[in-house]
Amino acid sequence: MSTGTLSPQIPPAPPRRRLISPAAGAVTAVVVAAHALAWHATEFSPAALVQGWRGMADFLGQALPPDLSWQQVLLPSLRAALITLAIGLLGTTLSVPPALGLALLAARTTAPNRWVYQAARSILSFLRAVPDVVFALIFVTAVGLGPFAGVLALILHNTGVMGKLWAEAMEEIDLGPRDALRVGGASGIQIAAHAVLPAVVPQFVGLLLYRFDVNVRSSLVLGLVGAGGIGFLVNQSIKLFRFDEMVTHLVVVMALVVAVDQLSAYVRRRIGA
Amino acid sequence: MTPADTTRRSSPPAAVVEAGDPALVVRGLRKSFSGRTVLDHLDLHLASGEFLALLGANGCGKSTALRCIVGLETPDAGTVTVHGHRLGAARGTEPAHLRRQTAMVFQQVHLVRRRSALDNVCAGALGRLPLRRSLAPILFPRALRQEAMACLERVGMADRAAEPAGRLSGGQQQRVAIARALCQRAKIILADEPVSALDPAAAEQVIGLLAGLAHERGLAVAAVLHQPQLALRHADRVVGLLHGRAVLDAAAATLTATDFEALYAPDHRPAEQEPR
Ligand SMILES: Nc1ncnc2c1ncn2[C@@H]1O[C@H](COP(=O)(O)OP(=O)(O)OP(=O)(O)O)[C@@H](O)[C@H]1O
Ligand SMILES: [Mg+2]
C-alpha cells in the first residue's frame, strides 16, 4: 500500500524537448496549404488592385467633397441614424427574455435534463449560425421593407449569440452556492434565481452592452438589404451614383458607431464587467 | 448509551428538540468513484443536542460522507435515517421536508457574494417558500426577513445584515452561512471544515457557536475538523475516519492527543493512484 516513501534513487530523467514535434509539423503544413488554396479560390490578385487605381481615383473625385446640404442630405442622414440606433436598441433589449430563457435551459448547471439541454443548444446554434442579414432578407419579404424587419432579424440572431454566451457564463460559475441551496430543498428555478443569476450579473450586463454595440453596427448592414435606417440611405446613394451623399452618410455612421462604442465601453468600465 | 450525556454542558438545553434523540443514523454507507472505494461501509450516528467532531486525514472520505448524507452525492449502498425516517438513495425520492431537516455548512461558505448577508440567510428558507414568493429577494415575505434577522442575531451578525456577503471577513461569512442553515430550520447541521480557512480566534468563535447550537438549541451538529485540539475542547464525541471507515468513536473527554496519531500516520495514507 505504502508506495509514497522517498528512496535514495536517481530521479527519472525529464522528458526531452523536441524542437518540432511531428504533430506541430503536420499542423503547420496543413495551415500553409489551406492558405495557398484560399489565395487561389478567392482570385486574390494585388495586380488587379494596382490596375484598378484609375477607377478608384474617379470614385474619390466624385465622392469628395461630401454633400453636406442640410435639408436634402444631412438631416435625413441624422434621422436615419436615429432609426438605426433604435433598431439596434430594440433588437438587443427584446432578445433578452428569449436569450435568458434559452440560456438557462442550455447551461449544464441549470438545465432540467439532458434532452432539454440538447434541444436548447441546437436552437441557439441555429439562431447563431444564420446571419442577421439572412434573417433580414426573410423578414423583408414577410413584413415588407423597413426597420421592423431589421428589429426582428436582430432579435433572432442576437438571441442565439447572447443565449450561447450567457449559457457559457452560467456553466463557469462556482457551484457551491447551488449545492448549499439544493441541500436546503430549493427547486431548480429557485436555484437559478438565487445562486446562478446573481453570480453572472456582471458578465450579463457586459455582454449585453457589447452586443448593443455590435447590433448597432449590424443594423447598418441590415439597412443595405432594405431593413431601414441609415444603411438604406447608403445603399440608395450608391445606386444613384451620388457618392458625395454616400460619404456624408458614412461620416454620420462613423460618428454613431464611435459614440455607441464609447458609451458601451464607459458603462462596462463603470460596472466592472 | 447517549454520548451527549457523558460530557460537560455549559447551559441547560432549550426545549427545541429533546436531547439524546437519535437525529441521524447512517448505516453501511458505501461510495466509490470510478472503481476506487472512498466510503467503505461507514456507520455513523448523531444525537440531538450533540456536537460531534469528524476527524481524518486528507482524502479519507469525510466530505464524501457528508455529501452522501445530504444527497449531493448518491451513495452506492447504505441507509441514511433522519429522525426515524429513512431517506431514499437519491434526492427527490422522499418528502422534501425530510431532506430540509439537514443543512450543510462548507469550508468555502458558498454564499452568493453579491447578495446581502440577509438575503443569503433568507435563501436558506427557499425549500418551504411558494414559488411566487421566492423568485427574487424583494418578494421574500416579511416574516421570513424577521426570522432571518433573528438567525443573524444568533450568530452575532445582525449589524452587518445589509452588507454584501463577499465583503465580510472569512469568519463573518462562515457565521452568516451558519445563520442560513438556521433559517433553513434544520435540526441537523453538517459542517465540512467550517474553520479550516479561519484564524485561531475566528475558528474558536465559529466552533463555539456550533457547539452552542447543539447544547443550547438541541440541534444535532457534526463538524469536520483538522485540529484535534479544537475537537477535544468543544466536541462531545469524536469520530475518526480512516479509508472510508469509522475507526475511532469515543467521548471527547476520554481521548488524548495520542489517540489521533493513528488517524494521521503516514503508513495509513492510501497510495496515490493518480494516473500519470
Ligand atoms: N466527485 C468525485 N469524483 C472522483 N473522485 C472523488 C470525487 N469526490 C471525491 N473524490 C475522491 O474521494 C476521495 C475522498 O475525498 P473527500 O473529499 O471525501 O476526502 P476528505 O476526507 O474530505 O479530504 P480533505 O480532508 O482533503 O477534505 C479522494 O481521493 C477524492 O479524490
Ligand atoms: Mg473534505
Image (cartoon, coloured by chain):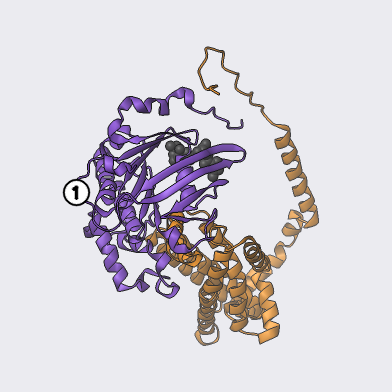
Chain colours: A orange, B purple
Quadrant for the N terminus of chain A in the image: top right
**Residue B2: quadrant of the picture:** top left
Q: Residue at x 55, y 13 (%)?
A: A9
Where residue B95 sits in the image (x, y, percent)?
48, 63
* Residue B78 x, y percent position in the rendering: 53, 46
Tell me the quarter of the image containing the C terminus of chain A: bottom left
Determine whether A199 is above or below B57 in the image. Answer: below
What percent of the width, then of the height, locates residue A20?
69, 31
Q: Amino acid at mark 1?
A: Ser
Q: Is residue B11 left or right of residue B136?
A: left
Front-most of B71 and B141?
A: B71
- Farthest residue to the left: give it: B11
**Residue under label 1:** B11
Q: Quadrant of ligand 2?
A: top left
Question: Is B211 positioned to the left or the right of A23 in the image?
Answer: left
Q: Residues within 10 Å of mark 1 (few under 14, many from 20)?
A: few
Side of A250 relative to B175 (left or right): right
Q: Helix, strand or loop at disc 1?
A: loop
On screen, residue B184 above or below B241? below
Snapshot quadrant of residue B161: bottom left
Residue A208 in the image, given as x and y percentages of width and height: 49, 66
Q: Residue at x 45, y 40 (%)?
A: B62
Q: Chain of mark 1?
A: B
Please state the total of marks drawn on the protein image: 1
Q: Is residue A104 visible?
A: yes
B226 w.r.t. B13: above or below? above
At 26% across and 43% down in the image, what residue appears?
B202
Query: A51 and A235: which one is in front?
Result: A235
Establish if B209 lies above or below A11: below
Residue drawn at x 53%, y 37% is B40
Q: Nearer the viewer, residue B114 or A138?
A: B114
